Amino acid sequence: MTATTEATRRLTGSKAMVEAIAQEMERDPNVIVLGEDVGTYGGIFGSTTGLLDTFGPDRVMDTPISETAFIGLGIGAAVEGLRPIVELMFVDFFGVCMDQIYNHMAKIHFESGGNVKVPMVLMTAVGGGYSDGAQHSQTLWGMFAHLPGMKVVVPSNPADAKGLMTAAIRDDNPVIYLFHKGLQGLVWMAKQSRAMGNVPEEPYEVEIGKAAVAREGADVTIVTLSLSVQHAIEVAEELAPEGIDVEVLDLRSLVPLDRDAVAASVAKTGRLVVVDEDYQSFGLSGEIIATVAERGVALKSAPIRVAVPDVPIPYARELEYAVLPRQDRIRDAVRKVMG
Amino acid sequence: MEDKTRADLFTTMVQIRAFEEAILADYHADKKPAWDIGAGLIPGEMHLSAGQEPVAAGVCAHLDNRDAVTATHRPHHFAIAHGMDINKLAAEIYGRETGLGRGRGGHMHLFDPDTHFSCSGIIAEGYPPALGQALAFKRQGAGAIAVAVTGEGAANQGAFHESLNLAALWNLPVVFVVEDNDWAISVPRTSSTSVLSNADRAAAYGIPGIRVEDNSVEGVYDAAGEAVQRARSGGGPTLIEVHTLRLWGHFEGDAQAYRPELPEVPGRDPIPSYEQQLIADAVLDETQIEQLRDEAKKRVQDALDFAKSSPTPDPSTATHYVFA
């Protein structure tokens, strides 16, 4: 972070995102925003609130419900020098437009031998916890990270929401920006107590690819991201009086993945819990453990994963809470890994 | 139509055919006795455009290199007609470091910033990016347009319909071109498409639609001229369907057993018939035609020589260019 002044303003995640976008739109006339309900409504999750009033309909464009057409449009516009920010309302909707994302947006730079750049941001809402069911509650970041050619960023707090958005807009690569609905500070969703945070007012970038130690600790490392970072910090503070000193590592991006930070933290603590709101198998949590194994980091006990146990996200609150990586499951995992 | 225009259309078609015939020969030269699609100087699938030259020649005659073209898995005719450097095109097809994509793309994935050309191997998915290029051009205000090409099989894909709607809604400077070569690999259009002409589908989006019959290069030229002018002058998109001809297989190695009219296909080749017409109308004589054929072949030979003498990519660079 290049912020130099002490941040004293507290913003929600959504306001931090909007501020980043607005500042970049002021700075660069090539930045445009498009997607469903990004105009008058201001983004279903508040990611574009007020931009239409400030920048007008030539730069903030509501689209038809045609994700293939408008994501593809973003790609073509990026190829010709614009810097589009395209919103896919819920990440769960990728199924209707994935070809443009992974076969076009992510591959054109490679297929062109580096001759054609696609500087675009695809921002999309992720996550569950409010009974939206199996088609509106997923995170799916591991799937995008699996496919080469896209950076994948996942903020956990308002300051990063702003700095990662600024970095994503300025990046010459396609960047998938996955923001958790539970961190947006929406008036129609229960507030996560940490959805508000201090955010510097001036423009700044959070470097994509650098994890952050969200809480220092000596006994066990929780590697996590997005909303789960806040859950992990809560658990860490609860367990501190018991003498368990938890380090929380916030990945901040999956691509690039800060493997050095993972290895360094686990080498220090010797114990690993991975908390991931994505499906457990074939994804990020396995990748983290593989990284630790490949680097030969010595562990004092077997690592534990707290993820969604390979089941679609259920509707009923009792069932959904049972599969999400909530505080109770994280707490149990930390105690278990401590022996 | 002016004689020079007719001669130019013919010259473009001959240039394309010379290229495709040369690729055809090299492609098959070293895959025998046992057919191996991954073997030889030119490996992989090969979709050649012989027979469809009238579409590319007629459309691209109205374009210059500030205009964008997004083509299909069968892209060479549009690439050449739009003015791509055929040395770089050939080198990419031969998988060489000097190719358009340094050998990372291949013949279905051609990207040329100099001519704003791209193509997609995924059916109908070249349409949406063309909208974005058109949007960028519209904002630049210099009159450049985008041409988006698909085959008739693609007109049943969602991307096709989403794109027509959005382009019409936003009045984007796009010309949509459908190459109806009757066959979606082995499926005839009568088994796939609910309307007789895809041009009729333009009405659903409130834009002009026109079908050009008989693979007529002059028919394409006239229809495209009007559509390009409309797009350049802010009149929005047009859909043009051309009834064209796939002279060869869907891909090289396709035995085409599904194609009952196969014996008649060579007789429908659009180049000899146009040649006869131009001779009859005294636009070109046989000597001139022979000369322009020789020149076309010479250009192709130079391009193939360039490609084949270029270095292959260094395997140690296989992971390069994923990110900028």
Image (cartoon, coloured by chain):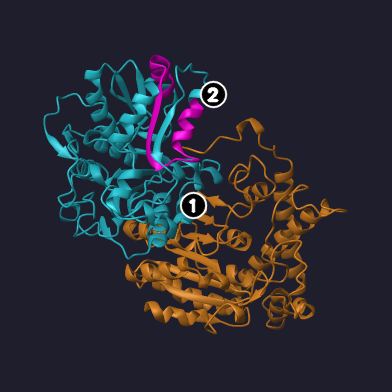
Chain letter for cyan? A
Viewer-side residue, B101 vs A314 = A314
The chain letter for the residue carrying disc 1 is A
Residue B200 visible from this viewpoint: yes
Viewer-side residue, B121 vs B49 = B121
Q: Does B99 sit above or below residue B21?
A: above
Which disc number belongs to residue A294? Answer: 2
Mark 2: amino acid: Glu
Instruction: Name the quadrant containing residue B236.
Output: bottom left
Determine the residue positioned at 61% across, 32% down.
Answer: B317
Q: Position of residue B16 (x, y in %)?
A: 67, 63
Give the residue furthest to the right: B33
Q: Is residue B256 magenta?
A: no
Q: Which residues are magenta?
A: A262-291
Q: Is residue A286 magenta?
A: yes
Viewer-side residue, B1 vs A192 = A192
Determine the residue positioned at 30% across, 38% down.
Answer: A326
Mark 1: amino acid: His
